[in-house]
Structure formats: structure tokens, C-alpha cells
Amino acid sequence: MGGKETRNFFWFSFRDNGTGFDQKYAEEAFKMFQRLTVTKTGTGIGLSLCKRIVENHGGYMTVNGLVGEGMTFKILLAAE
């Protein structure tokens, strides 16, 4: 009889109250050297590195944004 594997996960959610962005650019936010605004400083590598680290640990990372409302980042990681 085959058993069903049970895994536990950690789900993290972070929200800021910054300038946000149009949700249609969500995938662009994770591209290396990509910045969604020209009014702020930065190199455009931070979110790309975060997502790569999460994925290297078998996880998943998303971002949701609203212009003028900020962003919410969600990360799912296996509890191994």
C-alpha cells in the first residue's frame, strides 16, 4: 500500500507601505537589474537575489503590488 507523503511548510508574508507598482509588472520585479521606478535609488538586484535564494531552498516567492499602496511579498518554504 502506498503512503501519502505529508510535508510541513512555513508561509511568510511581508508588507510595506511604499509607492507600490502596477501588478502587471510583478514578474519584472524579480528580474536581475530591473527596477520598477526611477525615483528611488538601488541596483535592481535585491528581489532577484531573494527569489533565487528562496527557490534554491525549494521554495516559492511572489509579490503583489498596488500603486500608492505598497507591496506584499509571500514566501513558501518547506520545513525540513
Image (cartoon, helix red, strand yellow):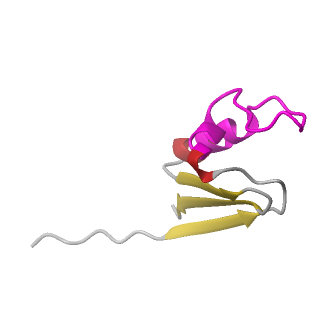
Q: Is residue 54 magenta?
A: no
Decide if residue 15 is on the left or right side of residue 78.
right
Decide if residue 41 is on the left or right side of residue 26.
right
Q: Residue at x 61, y 43 (%)?
A: 25
Q: Is residue 42 above or below residue 17?
A: above
Q: Residue at x 84, y 33 (%)?
A: 38
**Of the pair 52 and 57, the residue shown nearer to us:** 52
Residue 31 in percent (x, y) is at 62, 32
Decide if residue 74 is on the left or right side of residue 59.
right
Q: Is residue 35 magenta?
A: yes
Q: Is residue 24 above or below residue 52?
A: below
**Of the pair 53 and 16, the residue shown nearer to us:** 16
Q: Is residue 24 above or below residue 4?
A: above
> How many numbered circles are shown?
0
Q: Quadrant of residue 63?
A: bottom right
Residue 80 in percent (x, y) is at 51, 61
Q: Which residues are magenta?
A: 25-52
Decide if residue 22 is on the left or right side of residue 10.
right
What main secondary structure does the magenta stretch of the protein show?
loop
Q: Residue at x 52, y 53 (%)?
A: 60
Residue 65 in percent (x, y) is at 67, 57
Quadrant placement of the N terminus:
bottom left
